[in-house]
Image: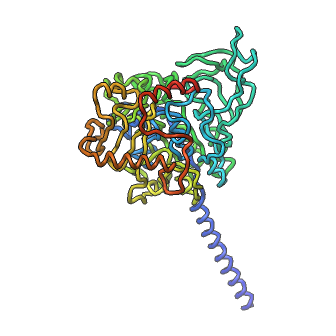
Amino acid sequence: MPAMQTMNRLHGAITAVLAALLLVSAAGAIETRKPNIVYVLADDLGYGDVKCLNAAGKIATPNMDRLAADGMIFTDAHGSSAVCTPTRYSLLTGRYNWRSTLQAGVLGGYGKPLIKPDQLTVPALLKQYGYHTACIGKWHLGMSMAPGNRPADGPAGGARWPVDFSKPIQDGPVTRGFDYFYGIAASLDMPPFVYIENDRWTAMPTVEKTWIRKGPAAADFEAVDVLPTLTRKAVAYLDARAKAGGPFFLYLPLNSPHTPIVPAAEWKGKSGLNAYADFVMETDWAIGEVLQALERNDLERSTLVIVTSDNGCSPSANFAQLQKNGHNPSYVFRGMKSDIWDGGHHIPFIARWPGKVAAGSKSDQLICLGDLLATCADLLGARLPATAGEDSVSILPALLGKADKPLREALVHHSIEGRFAIRQGNWKLELCPGSGGWSQPGDTAARKQGLPPVQLYDLAADIGETHNVQAEHPETVERLTRLLEKYVADGRSTPGARQKNDGPVDIWKKQSNELKKAKAAKKNGLVAD
């Protein structure tokens, strides 16, 4: 009997130890579980349009404000470019856009693929680690579409569409790392006006419609419905992934508040400012729907959410009208979308990851949208090959509150006209005399005014870039110019083996070269955004 009791006690002790080990193992599994990632990219949303970033702002953005209260605001985040396509290229590849074949302007709706088939992308990396990946929204990185070659492809009257909509699309998102795609080819003001699911058009266009530009459209396609449709698709995706299990990456590049500015009926007049402000409020609603879906599916704590914008606010927002009512989409920054000045590329960036990212926190780290690839690699403990993420720097230390020094050496900016700037610390050097974009003075006007060929600003003292100090600091101009030249020559700005750019890169663009490129861009189907 005593022996039996001893054995029972021993069995109980072993069971307790095993149970404890299982708990430790389970705790470890929870600790190391890969986070889901939801990356929301608004289109042309200005830094000053988000209330929690601009106390003087007049647009209500309660969902982005709540996200910031629960997470971290990055106060010095930038798109790699001041316009759509190039920034999206950098975001998904971790490579500066001007290393590609697109060194000015943006792609059109029928543009050819910009990301090379063998280029490592964020979703392709994540798939290697078991993630399901989806892109729902605006692609704008080019696709290979079958040419329209049958009269039936065109509308009544015999005209032919430029695309055969009965045939699959090649080289789209599902060939660049995404398991699933639903959305539109490019900006909402660029035809074709037909939804795409994976590699197929969801409808045959039977009419032509016009939203700034005219082109083939599905009969039931309406611009005003696109944001609600993308939002529903995103929510449905989150519901499905909650049931399926396993980590996922949802890249949600919204069409708003880019032109056409088409707030739904229930949002018209809500802001009391203008239609653009109404559209910003509807964009905030869409973000709120995504956050609610995460909460409803108990995914909130296991998901890193990032909400940002591709570039600054477009002049189509009607700055004069907004500013008359006390609202500045560019906040304290000079310029707007397209410009080399900060208003062109200084963007909102809010991140939330409960239990990892401190609630109500801020970071003043200089970061770029192209940092996503290196950040994902860091999250996974992965090492990027030398041919990937050439300009990507992990912001994970900043997210976790462990960054005690600058994460990147410098950051290169780019304007719609292909003008360069380089930022290091508080210094910003711009290799052009004017805006490099749409704001006045443009470069031609600046030359006529006799302005210096370069601009240098101390952003610590002059955040509005109003006082050019290039004459007082020639050594800084020289040092930053040499650093930019090195980044170009090395094919990368991060440590690693030298790489090749996709073509020649000229940081000193002459007016004659600009005109040649503009003509070439028009010939190749490129457009001003």
Q: Position of residue 16 (x, y in %)?
A: 65, 76
The answer to which quarter of the image holds residue 523 is: top right
Q: Quadrant of the N terminus?
A: bottom right
Q: Is residue 246 visible?
A: yes
Q: Determine the residue positioned at 59% across, 66% down.
A: 28
Q: Determine the residue positioned at 40% across, 26% down.
A: 438
Q: Position of residue 214 (x, y in %)?
A: 58, 17
Q: Determine the residue positioned at 68% across, 76% down.
A: 15
Q: Horizontal placement of 247 versus 414: left or right?
A: right
Query: Is residue 184 placed above or below 205 in the rendered structure?
Result: below
- Residues 335 and 353: in front is 335
- Residues 321 and 144: in front is 144
State the residue lying farthest toward the bottom.
2
Q: Determine the residue positioned at 67% across, 51% down.
A: 245
**How many numbered discs, if any?**
0
Q: Is residue 529 visible?
A: no
Query: Is residue 387 placed above or below 16 in the rendered structure?
Result: above
